[in-house]
Image (tube, rainbow, N blue to C red):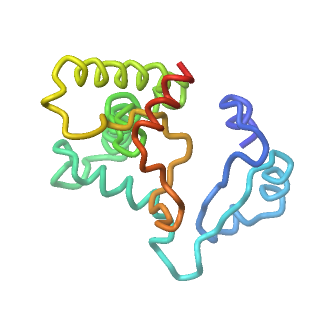
């Protein structure tokens, strides 16, 4: 955990580590390390196998890939290779709708802001050239800073797209 936090420049109170209720994850040594790093531990509810919605969502994405094997893997090595290729695709090629169709790698490297600004500019220019093709505001290309798997609908959302686009232009 220490190596990961240093390598990824994770600030205290920035990460929650969700795990099952296994004894290694609840051990005093690991919990003390997490506390020292400012990582908040989170545990599954007892006897609930699908308590980590992020992982369940990832499994669904994995199973719906055309390359997902129809038969069991021939070996542990074959399984590891397939999962490695999936992770490469998921992080570096798959454009995620929840983060405005950028890859997790682009988001992680803070490349999304510039990319999304360019998209916003393209949309605004297209609307200026052909206003008859647009019935309203352009798509929201403002960077997503916080992602929720199942966002609470009570959280107020910005509905004025002109305001969102003007804020995006200010940050560019």
Q: Which of 98 and 83 is in front in this view?
A: 98
- Answer above or below: position of 24 versus 76: below
- Answer above or below: position of 40 versus 113: below
> For residue 108, what is the image quadrant?
top right
Name the outermost residue toward the bottom. Answer: 47
Residue 115 percent location from the top left of the image = 41, 21
> For residue 97, what is the image quadrant?
top left
Q: Which residue is drawn at 70% across and 45% down?
A: 14
Residue 172 percent location from the top left of the image = 53, 18
**In which quadrant will I find the N terminus?**
top right
Q: Residue at x 25, y 40 (%)?
A: 136
Q: Nearer the viewer, residue 51 or 128?
A: 128
Query: Seen in the image, is 44 located left or right of residue 28?
Result: left
Can residue 57 be seen? yes
Residue 105 percent location from the top left of the image = 46, 29
Can residue 81 be seen? no
Q: Nearer the viewer, residue 128 or 77?
A: 128
Q: Residue at x 23, y 55 (%)?
A: 72
């Amino acid at each position: 955990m220490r190596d990961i936090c240093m390598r990824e420049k994770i600030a205290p109170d920035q990460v929650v580590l969700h795990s099952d209720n296994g004894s290694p994850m609840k051990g005093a040594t690991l919990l003390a390390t997490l506390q020292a790093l400012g990582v908040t531990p989170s545990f599954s509810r007892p006897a609930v196998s699908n308590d980590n919605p992020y992982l369940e969502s990832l499994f669904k994405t994995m199973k719906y890939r055309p390359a997902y094997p129809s038969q069991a893997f021939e070996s542990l090595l074959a399984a590891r290779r397939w999962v490695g290729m999936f992770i490469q695709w998921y992080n570096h090629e798959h454009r995620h709708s929840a983060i405005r169709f950028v890859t997790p790698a682009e988001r992680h490297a803070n490349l999304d802001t510039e990319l999304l600004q360019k998209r916003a500019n393209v949309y605004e220019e297209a609307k200026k050239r052909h206003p008859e093709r647009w019935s309203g505001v352009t798509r929201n290309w403002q960077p997503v800073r916080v992602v929720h798997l199942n966002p609470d609908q009570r959280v107020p959302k910005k509905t004025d797209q002109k305001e969102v686009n003007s804020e995006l232009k200010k940050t560019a």
